[in-house]
């Protein structure tokens, strides 16, 4: 039996002997094969390439989550790639750093801007390469924007609502309300406490005798306030502390 194909130039040419049907005369132009041969990318071969399965005498690619398979769906895996665990026909992975688990069940590289991620876009970062910080949008940036501070995991966290800027949760470094002054890391006061003067440019209360270590003091006082809820107590503490310098 001779089978022929009609080429674009309207001349009739014979199929390659390996093909059952074809679109041209080369061994790579087959469109079907006689068993036991199977069609793999235009060629009739004895067996499919790795990662393929035979359906209707034609090699079909396995689902990307499988290494080898018995069908094309993600439930048809018979073996899994190295990082994946085989479970009832499925290959499930927890991906190494820098890769994420694609919804189709395979590991895919994060966007280059991310250290780890849950998707392929720059807005899907879950951690950032040093010295970058993770913005609340999921993007990695050089620093947190105004009104945010960096936590231990190098993520930007929103400052308390009364802070314009802050060093950490509960410790403002400047106040949002221009009518308030910064005292003990808080922005709830209209004027500075006794023994403090107001720096009008920074709207910050500074200890008269303690121009140095101001930052440390702010943290100490904020801590004291949080734990005592008593301004009087804090003031006493302040004076004692100041005199010890
Ligand atoms: C036949 O196969 C060759 C090699 O793969 C390819 O370049 C060519 O386009 C094919 N011809 C037809 C008609 O499919
Ligand atoms: C007020 O604070 C700013 C910023 O910390 C500082 O540069 C400036 O010298 C301070 N001014 C006074 C009068 O202490």
Image: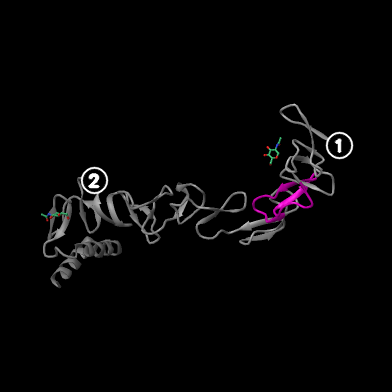
Q: What residue would you read off at disc 1? A: 2
> What stretch of residues is rendered in magenta?
44-68
Q: Position of residue 108 (x, y in %)?
A: 55, 52
In the image, is 95 to the left or to the right of 3? left
Using the rendered view, name the quadrant where residue 219 is placed.
bottom left
Q: Position of residue 146 (x, y in %)?
A: 30, 49
- Specify the farthest residue to the bottom: 244
Locate the N terminus by quadrant. Answer: top right
Locate the C terminus by quadrant. Answer: bottom left
First reached walking from the N terminus: tag 2 or tag 1: 1
Residue sitting at 82 percent across and 40 percent down?
Answer: 20
Using the rendered view, name the quadrant where residue 129 is placed.
bottom left
- Image quarter where ligand 2 lies: bottom left
User: Is disc 2 placed on a helix, strand or loop?
Assistant: loop
In the rendering, which numbered label is found on residue 177?
Answer: 2
Q: Nearer the viewer, residue 236 or 195?
A: 195
Q: Position of residue 177 (x, y in %)?
A: 24, 45
Q: Nearer the viewer, residue 23 or 100?
A: 23
Marks 2 and 1: CB-CB under 8 Å? no
- Reply above or below: 63 against 15: below
In the rendering, which numbered label is found on residue 62?
Answer: none
Q: Position of residue 48 (x, y in %)?
A: 75, 51
Label 2 crowd bin: few (<14), some (14–19), many (20+), radius 10 Å: some
Label 1 crowd bin: few (<14), some (14–19), many (20+), radius 10 Å: few
Residue sitting at 23 percent across and 65 percent down?
Answer: 216
Q: Nearer the viewer, residue 195 or 83?
A: 83
**Comparing labels 2 and 1, the label whose residue is closer to the camera:** 1
């Amino acid at each position: 039996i001779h089978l022929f194909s009609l080429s674009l130039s309207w001349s009739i040419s014979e199929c390659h002997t390996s093909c059952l049907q074809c679109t041209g005369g080369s061994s790579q132009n087959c469109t079907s094969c006689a068993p036991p041969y199977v069609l793999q990318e235009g060629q009739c071969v004895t067996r499919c390439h790795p990662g393929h399965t035979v359906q209707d005498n034609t090699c079909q690619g396995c689902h990307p989550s499988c290494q080898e398979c018995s069908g094309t769906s993600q439930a048809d895996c018979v073996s899994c790639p190295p990082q994946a665990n085989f479970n009832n026909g499925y290959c499930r992975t927890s991906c190494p750093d820098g890769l994420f688990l694609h919804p189709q069940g395979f590991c895919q590289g994060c966007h280059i801007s991310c250290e780890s991620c849950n998707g392929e876009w720059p807005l899907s970062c879950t951690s950032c390469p040093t010295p970058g910080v993770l913005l609340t949008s999921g993007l990695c940036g050089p620093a947190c924007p105004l009104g945010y501070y960096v936590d231990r995991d190098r993520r930007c966290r929103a400052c308390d609502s009364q802070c314009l800027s802050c060093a950490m949760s509960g410790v403002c470094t400047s106040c949002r309300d221009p009518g308030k002054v910064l005292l003990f890391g808080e922005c709830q006061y209209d004027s500075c406490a006794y023994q403090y003067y107001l720096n009008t440019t920074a709207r910050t209360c500074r200890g008269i005798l303690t121009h140095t270590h101001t930052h440390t003091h702010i943290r100490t006082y904020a801590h004291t306030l949080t734990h005592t809820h008593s301004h009087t107590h804090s003031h006493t503490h302040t004076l004692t502390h100041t005199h010890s310098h």
